[in-house]
Image (tube, helix red, strand yellow):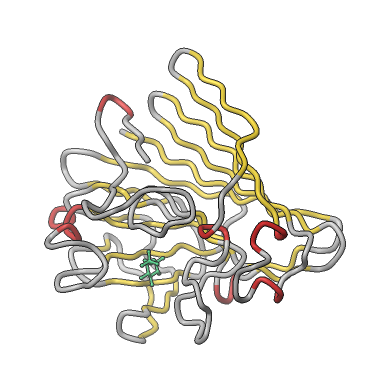
Amino acid sequence: MSWRPGGRERLYTASDAVVGAERMWHGGIPVCAPRFGVGNGGVPFIHGLTPKVRWRTLEVTADEGRAHIVLVTDAQVMSHLPWADRFPADLRYELDVVADATTLTIGLTIASPSRDAVVEMALHPYLLTDTARTQVTGLGGVAYHDFSNGLDGVGEDPLAVARYVDRVYTEAPSTTIADGSSALRLAGQGANSVIVWNPGPGNDQVPGEEWADFVCVEYGDVKSGALTIPAGSSHLLRLSIIAG
Ligand SMILES: O=P(O)(O)OC[C@H]1O[C@@H](O)[C@H](O)[C@@H](O)[C@@H]1O
């Protein structure tokens, strides 16, 4: 997966990634639903069921400087996966992606036609940045739990990310990720959590020193921010990333 505003790639893909439908790899923008696993003992897939299935492409349009893609999937497509039976069998998922010269906007809608559905959802961009020089701003004063060390805290501003960090913040303000040579501005809609993740040195998730090349700042509704989608309705989670 690639997004190159101004000719510069902004999404990390691990050098050992085998990219393909139904495979798990590190990079791009995983779409996590209807469960977000970190800290949930027993959840088989940390990012839920949606990354494990093939989505159907409904629309692809590209005119000068702008691309629009709509993808869909549903609970039936994932019914063979462990944990699928814990969610309504008629959940529907739609992903609406718009990219232009400066902005990438991703909307994830979950619709629950017939039952109240308790879900978690998150959009999980792997953003290229020089972590040694990166400052994430905007999360000051926001309560978090850090799964890297089990501690609760209140966000500092700016936040340094050149280390193992796995925080779930309990609010979702706009954030900026800047490393001196590039800046990305992130804003969520329909989000009440931000997750900040970097595996840090010595991890077994990405090769070698690649942890120093990216940070994930994810927007969603996870943990205490899980949602109940009432029967017959839907929830839209939207993430906008603006390159500066
Ligand atoms: O290894 P995965 O499944 O891509 O997950 C990467 C990371 O994704 C983050 O969203 C989680 O908070 C981390 O706990 C997790 O390690």
> Residue 240 at x, y = what percent?
48, 41
The residue depicted at 30 percent of the width and 84 percent of the height is 149
Q: Quarter of the image containing the C terminus?
A: top left
| In the rendered image, the vertical position of residue 40 relative to residue 212, given as above or below | below
> Residue 206 at x, y = what percent?
23, 63
- Judged left or right of residue 185, residue 238 is right
Pick the front one: 13 or 145 = 13
Pick the front one: 72 or 187 = 72
- Judged left or right of residue 54, residue 46 is left
| Res. 141 in view | yes
- Judged left or right of residue 203, residue 58 is right
> Residue 175 at x, y = what percent?
39, 51
| In the rendered image, the vertical position of residue 223 relative to residue 192, given as above or below | below
Q: Residue furthest top?
A: 64
| Res. 220 in view | no
> Residue 34 at x, y = what percent?
62, 65
Pick the front one: 125 or 175 = 125
Pick the front one: 186 or 65 = 65
The residue depicted at 34 percent of the width and 72 percent of the height is 166
- Judged left or right of residue 116, residue 108 is left
Query: What is the quadrant of residue 6 in the picture?
Result: top left
Q: Tell me the quadrant of ligand 1.
A: bottom left
The residue depicted at 14 percent of the width and 53 percent of the height is 133
Q: Quarter of the image containing the N terminus?
A: top left
Q: How many numbered markers are drawn?
A: 0
| In the rendered image, the vertical position of residue 183 relative to residue 30, given as above or below | above
